Amino acid sequence: MDRKVAVITGASRGMGAALVGAYREIGYRVIATARMIAPSDDPDILTIAGDIAERDTAERTISEGMAQFGRIDTLVNNAGIFIAKPFTQYTEADYATVLAVNMAGFFHITQCALGEMEKRQTGHVVQITTTLAERASSSVPAGLAALTKGGLNAATRSLAIEYAGRGIRVNAVSPGIIRTPMHAPETYAALDRMHPIGHMGDIADIVGAVLYLENAPFVTGEILHVDGGQSAGG
């Protein structure tokens, strides 16, 4: 009961899986949720399989986590969908899918987690957003990302002020393009050139930013850009 507990969404692979490992390394117990996620052999990792867009998944994640670990200290809203298309080519299915994961998924799990954090008057919520929500690129049409992740940036600031007096911090990490399996190797050179610093970021860059915010008790309402200079210009 005296060990901190982090909830991580989109935790089955890529950045989410790396965040699970990073929080375990600093001694946290972890509640890891994703649409498809296998049980863990680590007794300090509880896995919850389910669609983050559904209220039931959020409620099960928090209630089962509380039953097993007794507390919720941190929520990392990592789950997200990105579809790059010209705006007029988005389908109704694209729109529904992106809003369901990026917005409804954030709403349900954050509401449930904050309810538990309020009881203890302490906690931390972190969103993973994108610099494209604030600085558009002619190379990457990202209207739905701007709509949803930009909304999460705004919600981050709003919730930071709403909950500051209750001991709960709310922040976001805003990445540039991160080298993950979703990008084909033949695209790397072009993606590197989109960053003033000259290369894409790595998953470790985002994990490090989240852990910085985790250990920065005087920081709240921050949108931390980890984007190789994209947000500054270039």
Image (cartoon, rainbow, N blue to C red):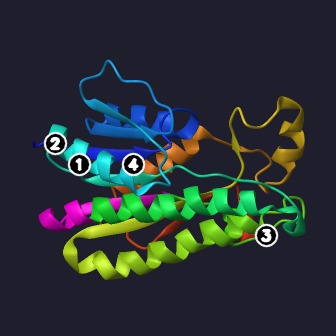
* Residues at marks 3 and 2, CA–CA distance in whole angstroms: 43 Å
| Residue 218 seen in the figure | no
Instruction: In the rendered structure, find residue 57 and report the number of the disc placed on it.
Output: 4
Amino acid bearing label 2: Ala
Q: Earlier in the sequence, mark 1 or mark 3?
A: 1
Asked whether disc 2 touches disc 1, contact meaning CB atoms under 8 Å apart, the reply is: yes
Q: Are marks 3 and 2 in contact (CB under 8 Å)?
A: no
Q: Is residue 116 visible?
A: yes
Dot 1 amino acid type: Ser
Magenta part of the chain: 115-127
Tag shown at residue 67: 2
- Is 123 in the magenta? yes
Q: Residue lying farthest top?
A: 41
Per the model, the C-alpha gap separating discs 1 and 4 is: 10 Å
Please provide percent x and percent y for residue 206. Answer: 55, 47
Amino acid on which disc 4 is placed:
Thr
Image disc number at residue 136: 3
Label 1 – label 3 distance at C-alpha: 39 Å
Q: Nearer the viewer, mark 3 or mark 2?
A: 2
Lower sequence index among marks 1 and 4? 4
Q: Quadrant of the C terminus?
A: bottom right
Q: Is residue 21 left or right of residue 119?
A: right
**Closer-to-camera residue (131/152):** 152
Q: Secondary structure at mark 3?
A: loop
Closer to us: mark 1 or mark 3? 1
The N terminus: image quadrant: top left
